[in-house]
Image (cartoon, rainbow, N blue to C red):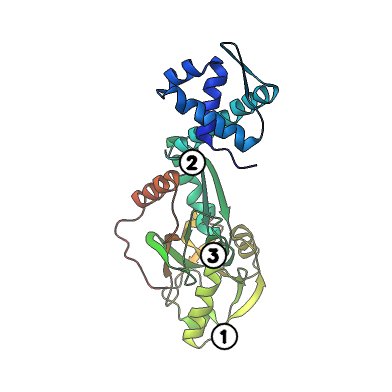
Amino acid sequence: MRNMNLHQLATFQVVAKHCSYVRAAEELNFSQPAVSAQIHQLEESLGVKLFDTIGRKTHLTQAGEELYLYSQKIFSVIEEAMEMMSSLASPYFGRLSVGADTTVGSYVIPALLGEFQKMYPNVEIMLKVANRDYLVDDLLNNHLDMVVMGKIPSEAPVFVAPFALNELVIVAPPNHRLAGCVNAPLTELARERFLLREHGSGTRAALEKAFQEAGLPLQVSMEVGNNSAIKKSVEAGLGIALISRVALDIELETNRLVILDVEGFPIERQWRLVHLKDKNLSATARAFKAFMLQHADPNLPLMDT
């Protein structure tokens, strides 16, 4: 059995609808011999007769009746597929998968996604908040359309645009011995015990780099998995921490935490919008990229990491 093609099946469907080669030829704007040839080729491909001609009337065989039912299903699915492709060519439909590191993903991106969702209410949005290592893995495996992160991946060519400043500050309880000091020497921090984020965190890497470059030891109190737990632990007197300024509004307003003025701090980093350079972004992803770039800090140059 040879494979049938859609052109033959479409011709068959019209002949079956009218039970007439003549009327099918008129509808298709073909000659009657051309229509008959298509049906003959289809019958040869399938190995069955599809029509009986009795006198001047054309009738579907049992095989023809069954194929007619299947042809209606086939063309219905094709029409549905074409409608879906058409909708996906528009930014107002489809899915969007966004990744963000834990800080920007918790304190900045949700509000922007809410604004984007109001503009594109039929878009299905997935946000993954994780540390850099997980985000890079998902980006390289094409599980995410784009990511907002700090350190740029080096494993593959990527599009990168600066998005927002990430100011990393030292926080402590209000009664800390360095609270109120001006430009305290970094050596004073070497006497403190720090609460650190997990391995793979950009904030942890920035703190470790600062101490390493200063040639000072970094004393660790404990490792804590998220910003909320870090802040609660600092409030409880378990140590001090380096944390993004955007995560501190409520704690600073209520005087539960203070920012220490220390030599070399704050550390200025930035969040960037990143996607694989070779990725074919959907219409929805392109709309989100344009939206994010419109909301990016226009005065922020691309920094080295």
Q: Please tell me which residue is depicted at 42% across the width and 40% down the height of the picture.
A: 89
Residue count near mark 1 (Cα–Cα under 10 Å), binned few <14, some 14–19, many ≥20? some
Tell me the tag on residue 217.
1
- Name the residue at the bottom extreme: 215
Q: On the image, numbered disc 3 is attached to which residue?
A: 136
Mark sitting earlier along the chain (1/3): 3
Mark 3 residue type: Val
Which one is in front, 81 or 133? 81
Query: Vertical placement of 4 versus 167: above or below?
Result: above
- Name the residue at the right extreme: 62
Mark sitting earlier along the chain (3/2): 2
Q: Which corner quadrant of the image does residue 69 belong to?
A: top right
Between the residue at mark 3 and the residue at mark 2, the CA separation in whole angstroms equals 24 Å
Q: On the image, numbered disc 2 is attached to which residue?
A: 114
Q: Where residue 226 sits: x, y (%)?
A: 62, 61
Q: Where residue 141 sits: x, y (%)?
A: 56, 61
